[in-house]
Image (cartoon, helix red, strand yellow):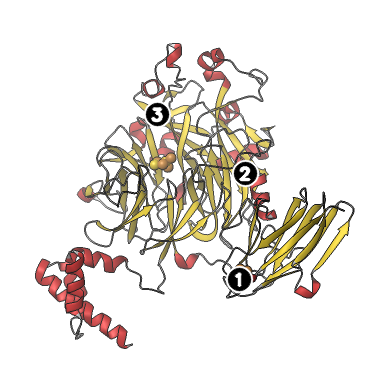
Amino acid sequence: MIRFLDRSGLLSSWVRITIAVVGLGATFALAGTMIACAGNAQGDLMAVAAARGISPDDAVRALKSFVPPGGKDDYLLFASGGHSGQVFVVGLPSMRLLRMIAVFTPEPWQGYGYGSDWSEAALAGASPGKETIRWGDSHHPALSETDGDYDGRWLYINDRAHGRIAMVDLKDFRTKQILPVPNLQTSHGGVFITPDSKYVHISSMVPALKHWDPKVGASVTVDDHLNRYDEIYRGYSTFLKIDQETGRMVVEDSFQIELPPYTQDLADAGKGPSYGYAFINSYNSERATGGVNFGRPPLEAGASEYDFDFMHIINWQKAEEVIAAGKFDVVNGIRLISLETAVEESLIHLLPEPKSPHGVDVAPNGNYLTVSGKLDPHVTVYGFDKILAAIEAEDFEGTDDYGIPIIRFDAAVAGQVEVGAGPLHSQYDNEGYGYTSLFLESAVAKWSLGEPYHSGDAAWQLVDKLPVHYNIGHLATAHGDTMNPRGGYLVALNKWSIDRFTNVGPLLPQNFQLVDLSGETMDLLYDMPIGVGEPHYAQIVSADVVNPEQVYPLGTSAMTGERSPDAIDGGDQARIDHRPGVTEVWMTAIRSQYAPDVVPIKLGDHVIIHLTNIEQALDATHGFSIPGKNIMVSIDAGETITIEFEADTPGSFSFYCTEFCSALHLEMQGWLIVEEN
Ligand code: CUK
Ligand code: CUA
C-alpha cells in the first residue's frame, strides 16, 4: 500500500512538471485526478527520465501502455506468423508476446509434430500424399463469432502457400485440425467467419486447374496454359461448415461455388442487413498468364490493363437452397456448384472496384463495404442497400465473359474518401470511423463513414493521418471485424523496421506499432519488434472473452477432449506389456519421476507409450524426449499422450523431461533398454 501511494505521488508530482513543460490538455486531465497526492519521489522520476533521454510526451505514452509486473493485459491480439507458419498471441496494451501457437510448422516446445498423437493427427490431415509438407504461410486469422462478436471459442487461419486452413481450439490454444481444402491450390485473403460461426470461408487465390474435368484432364502443356487459360482454370469460394461442438470443419457438410479464373483475394462476411452474403475481391480480371519468355507481357502489366477489377457478391444462403435442391456435383469430396449453375441461379453478381483492390472490409452495421485499390488514393465505400437495389432493378452494365451480371459502379457507391497513397486494409472503431493502412505512404488514415454514423459535411472526410514505420500491411482495431468494435487501440502491422531497432542483421524484425485511438488525433504509443515471422493479419479480442482451460481433467486426450482409453490415474497403475513384435507401456509423469522409469524393449519391436501427466496444478507441464529419435512431446497437467516409434537400434537410450518442472527436474529421467534378444 505504501509502495502504491509512493508510486501515485511520484506520478502526480511529475505530471505537474510535465504540464509546465508541454502544457498538454490531455496531461492536465490526468494530473487533475492526482494533483492532491503528495509525492516525494518526483526527483527520482525526473532524474530517470532525464538520464534516459525520455521526453515528457514519451513518458505519458509509456504510462499508457505500461502494465506493471504481475498486471494483466486488457486485450489479446492473435497475429498470423506468415511463413513461420505459426500464430502469435500478444497482450495489449503492454505489447508483450504471451504465446506462440504452432499451426503449420512443427514446434518442439509445444511437442508439436515430434511424435505426440494429437499433433501428428493435426499435421497428418495436412497434406495427404504430401507428408513432407511441414511448413505453411499463415495469413488471415478469423476468430469465431456469436451474434456478430468474438466469442473466444476457436481461431481459423489459412495457409497461403498450400490452400489449407487450420482450426486452433482456444480451450487449450492448440491446433486441432489442418484441412487441405479440396480443389484449391493456394489461398490468400479469402478467409472470414460468418457472424454466427456457421461457416468459415476460404477461397482460392491463383485459379486452379480443373483436373477433374475430362476436357482438361490430368496433364497440361504450356500451350494450354497460355491459350486455354479461360477454360481450364477456375476459382473457388468454399463454405466450410463448422461443427458447433468441436469447432472442426466438416467437409461433407460444406460446399463450394465455382468462380471465374480471376485471382480471388481478400474477402469479408456480410452481417446484419448483409447477413447471408459474402464479398470477395479479385484482381487479374484480364486473366493474364505471365510468360515473358513466350512473348507475353509480365503478369503485373498484363493484370493492369482494365480500369476495374471485380468484387464478387455471393448470396450463400441462396447457394444453400441450390445445394438442398441437389444442383451440385461432388468433386474431390466436396459439393461443388458449377459456374454455370451459379449464374443460372443468380448466386453471384460482380461489382467493379478500383484497380488492383486489396482489402474489402464490412463496417460494423453491415451496410458499408470499404474497398481499397492499391493504385487509387481513395477508399471506395459501397452501400449494401444500394447493391441490393441495383440487383433488384437489374441496374447492370452487362456481364463478364462468363455471363455474370456486373452491377453499375455508380449505383452502388455510397462514398469515396481520398486517403493517400497505396491504401490496403480498413478497420473500424465504435464511433463510425474507418482506419485504412497506406502502404506506399507508410501511414494510417482515419476517416468518417456516412449515415447513420456521420451526416452532412462530417461524413466521408479524412480526419487524421499518422505516419507509421514502415510499409504497413494490415492494421487491427479492438473487435475491429465485428458488429461491436471497441475502439481504444489500433495496431499497425508494418513490414519494415529499418532504423527503428538496434540492427540485428540483414533480416530485420517486423514492427507492430500500438496506436492510441482515445484522443482527437491518433497517437503512437509503442513499437514492438516481431523477430520470429512475418505477420499479415491480426484480430484483437477483449481478454475476458478468451477463457482457456486451467488444467485438463485427469487422463484427457487433447485430440478428442475426452478421457483417453489409455489414461491411468497413478504410478501404481503403470505397466509394461510385451507381446510379439510390440512393447506397450502405460506410464505416468509427476514431479519428479516417470513410472516406469526403466523400460525393457525387444530389438525390432514397435513401441507404444501412453503417457499421462497426473498433475492437477496449472502450468505443471512435463516434457518427454528421446534424443536421437525425433521424439519430443509436451504433456500438460492432466493430459494423456500416445507416442509410437520403432526400436530399430540396440542399446540404452535415456529419456528425460524437457520442462524445468521442479528442483529435482534433472532427476526426472529414465532408460529405454533395447535388448537384442
Ligand atoms: S495480405 Cu499481407 S498485407 Cu497477404 Cu492480408 Cu494485405
Ligand atoms: Cu518434469 Cu522436468
Q: CA distance from mark 3 to mark 1?
A: 61 Å
Q: Which residue is mark 3?
A: 309
Q: Residues within 10 Å of mark 1 (few under 14, many from 20)?
A: some
* Left or right, residue 566 beside residue 615: right
Q: Position of residue 387 (x, y in %)?
A: 41, 38
* Left or right, residue 102 beside residue 397: right
Q: Which residue is mark 2?
A: 179
> In the figure, 538 relative to 290: above or below?
below
Q: Residue at x 40, y 67 (%)?
A: 74
Question: In the image as oriented, which residue stretches furthest toward the right?
Answer: 580
Looking at the rendered structure, the kind of residue marked 2 is Leu
Q: Position of residue 397 (x, y in %)?
A: 40, 25
Looking at the rendered structure, the kind of residue marked 3 is Asp
Q: CA distance from mark 2 to mark 3?
A: 30 Å
Looking at the rendered structure, the kind of residue marked 1 is His
Q: Kindly check if marks 1 and 2 are in contact, taking CB atoms under 8 A apart as contact.
A: no
Q: Is residue 32 visible?
A: no
Q: Position of residue 560 (x, y in %)?
A: 70, 59
